[in-house]
């Protein structure tokens, strides 16, 4: 008699029914939004100087200053409009915003705030630390992070995985004049992808060496680069940990004056948070995309939940992200367990504070 498989099947069925019932129950709860926090990628921009390559056909044809284009400003405003539509009632409580010190990030934040606030934001505080002391969005400056990432890159497993792209490396070297014989070749291809993506957004034709098939491979290698940056708990604690800690501190604070917290960063910042949530999506974020965390409180019991949303940027869709083991509404204690391994410990904090520093610079209030 095959009793054990039957028992296992019934147990699996019971578990599935229980999980479904929990999901259904949470979805029916009456909750109020108390706090909204989000990290978003800058809008379309011109390339940065360090993204160019020796045989770049557009090197002398366009500016390489990293500033937003008109399309990039539009993209950021569209995010602001979406936030205004969903969270208008929170605006009178004020706004807290934080930006990486890159021009494209600062300009994106300005456009988002203008579209979001109009005349409703009576109190606004914006923090823009210099790049060298930005613990939250440039925590990768920590030397421990680089040593851990370098060790990972040199591991046999990663070397074997990267070897699959040897043909692409040789092709790119031949066509662009770039040297890709270093351990951080994934970083260089990531920059190359950002360059071509930027040029493409400016309605420039793809370079002759980069037909759509090769462009797709650059996108794939960018995903590989992002994956390596958050491959293990130690890297996640150094990469996304400071931002996750910020989000949790605000969620658990007895009272926060500003009810909307904006963090303006780059694509890798959005991906870092995604990996901290144990998600692999978005693989490579579009311009203007965002991950949004809502703190919600059940009206009847006062129980706190977290709802995670994704704004897709270019395609302008917003939909919930279901975290592992959670319904759309994730109990706060369960959410904390999901990100627990990402929270920086004493070792990581020491590196961040010693190597990066911390000094918020208030730009406007």
Image (tube, grey):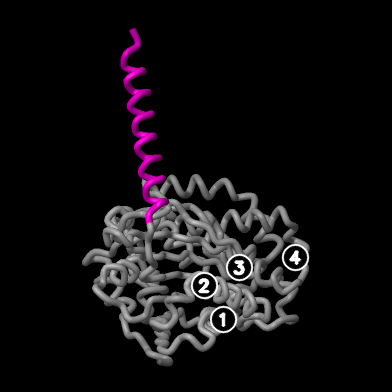
* CA distance separating discs 1 and 4: 32 Å
Q: Is residue 181 magenta?
A: no
List the single residue furthest toward the bottom. Answer: 364
In this view, the residue in front, 124 or 337, is 124
Which of the two discs, 2 and 1, labels the residue nearer the N terminus? 2
Crowd tier of the residue under label 3, counting other residues whose Cα lies within 10 Å: few below 14, some 14–19, many 20 or above: many
List the single residue furthest toward the left. Answer: 346
Identify the image quadrant of residue 96.
bottom left
In this view, the residue in front, 297 or 110, is 297
Left or right of residue 49: residue 7: left
Q: Which residue shows up at 32% across the image and 13% down it?
A: 3
* CA distance separating discs 4 and 2: 33 Å
In the image, residue 361 lies at what x, y percent? Answer: 37, 89
* CA distance separating discs 3 and 2: 26 Å
Q: Is residue 330 above or below residue 261?
A: above
In the image, residue 275 lies at what x, y percent? Answer: 42, 57
Q: Nearer the viewer, mark 3 or mark 2?
A: 2
Which of the two discs, 3 and 4, labels the residue nearer the N terminus? 3
Residue corresponding to mark 1: 115
Left or right of residue 299: residue 227: right
The answer to whether the residues at label 3 and label 2 have Cβ atoms under 8 Å apart is no
Which of the two discs, 3 and 2, labels the residue nearer the N terminus? 2
Q: Which residue shows up at 60% across the image and 82% down it?
A: 67
Residue corresponding to mark 2: 83
Q: Which residue shows up at 41% across the image and 70% down it?
A: 36
Residue corresponding to mark 4: 206
Residue 3 seen by the camera: yes
What residue span does the magenta drawing correspond to?
1-29
In this view, the residue in front, 38 or 283, is 38
Q: Is residue 217 above or below residue 248?
A: above
* SS assignment at label 2: helix
* CA distance separating discs 2 and 1: 9 Å
């Amino acid at each position: 008699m095959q009793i054990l498989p039957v028992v296992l099947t019934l147990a699996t069925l019971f578990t599935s029914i229980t999980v479904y019932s929990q999901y259904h129950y949470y979805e029916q709860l009456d909750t109020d939004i108390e706090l909204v926090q989000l990290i978003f990628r800058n809008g379309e921009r011109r390339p940065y100087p360090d993204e160019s390559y020796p045989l770049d056909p557009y090197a002398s044809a366009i500016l390489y200053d990293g500033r937003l284009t008109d399309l990039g400003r539009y993209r950021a405003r569209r995010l602001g409009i979406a936030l205004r539509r969903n969270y208008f009632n929170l605006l009178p409580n004020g706004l807290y915003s934080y930006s990486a010190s890159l021009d494209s990030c600062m300009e994106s934040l300005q456009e988002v705030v203008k579209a979001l606030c109009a005349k409703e934001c009576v109190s606004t505080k914006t923090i823009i630390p210099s790049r060298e002391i930005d613990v939250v969005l440039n925590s990768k400056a920590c030397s421990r992070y680089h040593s851990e990432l370098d060790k990972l890159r040199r591991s046999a497993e990663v070397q074997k995985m990267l070897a699959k792209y040897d043909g692409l490396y040789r092709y790119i070297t031949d066509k662009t004049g770039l040297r890709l014989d270093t351990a951080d070749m994934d970083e260089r291809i990531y920059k190359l992808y950002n360059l071509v993506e930027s040029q493409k957004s400016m309605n420039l034709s793809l370079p002759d060496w980069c037909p759509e098939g090769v462009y797709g491979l650059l996108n794939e290698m960018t995903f590989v680069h992002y994956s390596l940056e958050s491959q293990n708990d130690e890297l996640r604690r150094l990469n996304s940990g400071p931002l996750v800690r910020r989000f949790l501190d605000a969620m658990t604070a007895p009272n926060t004056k500003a009810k909307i917290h904006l963090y303006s960063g780059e694509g890798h910042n959005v991906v870092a948070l995604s990996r901290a949530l144990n998600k692999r999506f978005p693989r490579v974020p579009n311009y203007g995309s965002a991950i949004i965390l809502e703190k919600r409180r059940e009206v009847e019991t006062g129980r706190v939940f977290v709802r995670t949303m994704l704004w897709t940027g270019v395609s302008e869709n917003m939909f919930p992200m279901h975290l592992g083991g959670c319904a759309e509404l994730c109990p706060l204690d369960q959410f904390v367990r999901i990100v627990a391994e990402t929270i920086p410990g004493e070792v990581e904090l020491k590196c961040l504070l010693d190597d990066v520093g911390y000094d918020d610079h208030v730009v406007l209030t």
